[in-house]
Image (tube, rainbow, N blue to C red):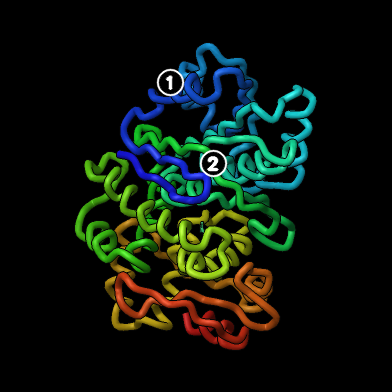
Amino acid sequence: MKLSVDLINPYEIEIGSNIIKKLNTYLKENYKNSKILIISDDLVYKIHKEKLIKELDGFFYKEFIIKNGENSKSTENLIKILEFAAENQYKRNDLIIAFGGGVVGDISGLVASLYLRGVDYISIPTTFLSAIDSSVGGKTAVNLKAGKNLCGTFYQPKKVFIDTDFLKTLSDYYFNDGLAEAIKYGMIKDKSIFDEISKENVSKTYENLPSIIKKCLDIKKDVVKDDEKDFGIRQILNYGHTFAHAIEKNSNFEISHGHAVALGMKIMVKNFYESFYDDFIKVLKKYNLDKEIDFDTEKILKVCMVDKKSRNDRINIIVVRNLGTCEILNIDLKDLRKIYENR
Ligand code: GLY
């Protein structure tokens, strides 16, 4: 399955079982004389290294491996990777391969956008969550002390390979993390995604998984095409995310992104779509995505204030009042407090 992200510099996403097998040919056709810098994390690299290295036959490469987990998406690691690239004399025609989940993808994209004012990178997501979200669309980032993704750029990859076989080694917890983002796409744009997830038992071996991934990315690529730099419509991809980022941060990232997105959406459904609340909770419970949260209101709002969708004392939130459609509402931070308190 192939999709094209139609920006000024368009790129392709390929989805399917064993898609990694196409990497060597792609590299020979596009990066014949380039050195490769692989950025990955220790867990992913331990499990999947062999499959990647096999595809680098004929290429010089080095690896920079970060520790698995959100805390690695740091300014310290960003500088270390940039210094590593410089010490090893990577040049402008060289290539970065982001091989891992969202943390690896985000920091690799940022390195690629900064190093020598920009080198090419390709993305090989290994989690369901990063396959349907961060590997596509060119948002790159590291976290700052005040919050998630506060330092970043927009910088598109040259190609995305989504090999669904990598997803098979995910734990149920991390598979369901991705499912929360798929539920998000269902809520904001495509009811059929939500219906399928609620009716079927979607697991890492689910036959129709590539088609769910494609449906999610069909939405994402269209939204990114219309608003690459996130000034307008792209904000709808952040349904549930204002509270989700605050929940992640307040849990010291023990609650992972997708699980936090599920809880963020739960707050939004409770406040804006109460007639759907029971159906929504049923789906969250089915995939172990439901949880009571009791983080202090002030601590949650403090993180929300630095959300990239906030300006002065107002913030844009995404609201769903009907399955498969959404709107952007600009509200006062006082109202955001009320929404959180009414969770
Ligand atoms: N993850 C939301 C976006 O890419 O805009």
- Quick check: can you spot residue 117? yes
Residue 91 placement: quadrant: top right
Determine which residue is flagged by label 1: 25
- Quick check: can you spot residue 77? no
* Front-most of residues 191 and 60: 60
Q: Residue 103 location, x and y as percent?
A: 58, 45
Determine which residue is flagged by label 2: 157
Q: Is residue 113 left or right of residue 167?
A: right
Residue at 55% across, 77% down: 316
Vertical comparison of 126 with 304: above or below = above
Secondary structure of residue under mark 1: helix
Q: Residue 229 location, x and y as percent?
A: 58, 60
Residue 309 placement: quadrant: bottom right
Residue type, label 1? Thr
- Say if mark 1 contacts mark 2, CB within 8 Å: no
Question: In terms of sequence position, does the residue under pointer 1 or pointer 2 come before the other?
Answer: 1
Q: Residue furthest front?
A: 8
Residue at 50% across, 81% down: 329
Residue type, label 2? Pro
Q: Residue 114 location, x and y as percent?
A: 72, 42
* Front-most of residues 113 and 163: 113
Position of the N terminus by quadrant:
top left
